[in-house]
Amino acid sequence: MSRETDVLDTQNYDVSGVAVNKVLRNTYALLAMTLVFSALTAAASIFLNMPPMTYLICIGVAMALMWFVMPKVANSASGLGVVFLITGLLGFGLGPILNQYLALQNGGQLIATSLGGTGVIFFALSAYALTSKRDFSFLGGMLFVGFMVVLVAALANIFLQLPAMSLMISSVVILLMSGFILFDTSRIVNGGERNYIMATIGLYMTIFNVFIHLLHLLGFASDD
Amino acid sequence: MSGMEIGTALLLVAFLALLWPNAKYWLKNSPEPRDGDWTAVALPIVGVILFVMLLMNMV
């Protein structure tokens, strides 16, 4: 088997249980590894006490890799290296944010609660999409347009500086990402996504966004 | 405006530009929902809302 077909077996792919299970198994294995890796890079970033600008730089570089490099390498084994690079960067970028929360009296508790909450949301929605086997691809247009509206609102709030709007954005992002978990998982189950590297990136981004925005809401709820 | 704010604004604009082709594709190619599809989405989403509210009350 060539290295390319390790990632995407287009010749023999069908939507049968075996092929779908293979993509699912590979996706969740890679997702688990990338989450552990980004936790390690986040810990390194916390330890090094990186400045706030690190977050923006890491997100910017990760985004560029996702859009301009990933499509070219997603069907080859080198795509695995790029996934680890992207998720490692995103984890490293989290360091300054986590440091701000850790400086709070109950910061550790907030981070742990957000981490646990993200895990519960992800596992519950994934299990729901996997067991129901429904096709949630009809959500695609609404989710992408909704996300674009949220980005415009976030852009506006840089100038408006409204705390209520910031909370509203975080709440909507959590709901949109919940929709994306259903959408992405059902695409794997129904054969719409056959590349486990792309599937991993999609699911990782939903987890990343739920974690960040849940942390924001919990920080607000605890009056910090 | 601080450097962070300018950087965030630039990133958001870039993200919007990059996301637009995907949004356009899915707007054109999303299948029509069948009976019960919206209920199947609403149930877990309501669950997420209640769960987040519970977490916010806990901290």
Image (cartoon, rainbow, N blue to C red):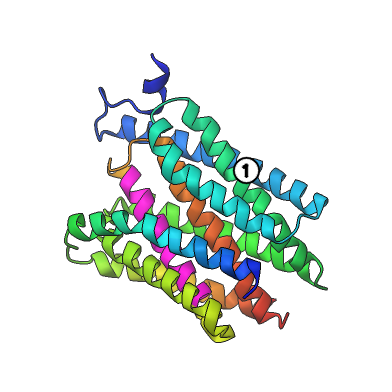
Q: Is residue A208 magenta?
A: no
User: What is the three-letter code of the residue carrying label 1?
Assistant: Gly
- Of the pair B27 and A175, the residue shown nearer to us: B27
Q: Which residue is mark 1?
A: A88
Seen at 71% across and 61% down, the residue is: A52
Principal secondary structure, stretch drawn in magenta: helix
Seen at 62% across and 77% down, the residue is: B56
Residue B13 appears in which quarter of the rendering? bottom left
Counting from the top left corner in percent of width and height, residue A83 is at 52, 38
Counting from the top left corner in percent of width and height, residue A162 is at 56, 85
Seen at 68% across and 55% down, the residue is: A54
Q: Left or right: where does residue A88 sit relative to residue A66?
A: right
Q: Is residue A186 magenta?
A: yes
Q: Which residues are magenta?
A: A169-188
Chain that bears disc 1: A
Outermost top residue: A1
Q: Left or right: where does residue A46 sit relative to residue B4?
A: right
- Of the pair B26 and B9, the residue shown nearer to us: B9
Q: Left or right: where does residue A140 sit relative to residue A170?
A: left
Seen at 28% across and 27% down, the residue is: A10
